[in-house]
Image (cartoon, rainbow, N blue to C red):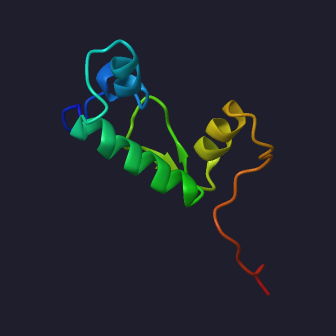
């Protein structure tokens, strides 16, 4: 995937390989680039938001989800964690 396990350096940023491609440092057939794209688009299409500093980090419904969705100009107002009936 282009970064070591639990790597928090810039090489783990979601767009790092896209930048490397635009600079001509890797080709469009790079397995790491292709795999990151598959992960990103699969999770995004399922409604998850990516944390841009970690290509593997996706959130749904929590506060980080709201923060990252707003960064992309989405109109998300509140975090939610699932719904439950109030106590009786």
* Residue 40: x %, y % from top left: 45, 46
| Rendered position, 20 above or below 81 | above
* Residue 22: x %, y % from top left: 40, 17
Location of the C terminus by quadrant is bottom right
Question: What residue appears at the point 39 percent right and 34 percent down from the top-left corner?
Answer: 54
* Residue 74: x %, y % from top left: 75, 41
* Residue 36: x %, y % from top left: 35, 42
Query: Looking at the image, which is closer to me, 42 or 54?
Result: 42
Query: Looking at the image, which is closer to me, 22 or 6?
Result: 22
User: Which quarter of the picture shows residue 24?
Assistant: top left
Query: Looking at the image, which is closer to me, 81 or 47?
Result: 47
Does residue 79 appear left or right of residue 49 in this picture? right
Question: What residue appears at the point 40 percent right and 26 percent down from the top-left corner?
Answer: 18
| Rendered position, 21 above or below 65 | above
Question: What residue appears at the point 62 percent right and 37 percent down from the top-left corner?
Answer: 68
Considering every residue shown, the one lying at the far left of the view is: 4
Does residue 66 appear left or right of residue 7 in this picture? right
Question: What residue appears at the point 65 percent right and 69 percent down from the top-left corner?
Answer: 82
User: Which quarter of the picture shows residue 1?
Assistant: top left
Considering every residue shown, the one lying at the far top of the view is: 23
Visible residue check, residue 53: yes
How many numbered tags mark residues here? 0
| Rendered position, 54 above or below 19 | below
């Amino acid at each position: 995937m282009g970064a070591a396990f639990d790597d928090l350096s810039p090489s783990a940023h979601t767009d790092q390989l896209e930048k490397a491609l635009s600079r001509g440092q890797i080709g469009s057939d790079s397995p790491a680039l292709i795999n990151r794209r598959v992960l990103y688009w699969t999770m995004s299409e399922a409604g998850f938001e990516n944390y841009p500093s970690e290509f593997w980090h996706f959130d749904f419904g929590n506060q980080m989800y709201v923060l990252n969705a707003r960064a992309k100009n989405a109109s998300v107002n509140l975090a939610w964690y699932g719904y439950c009936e109030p106590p009786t």
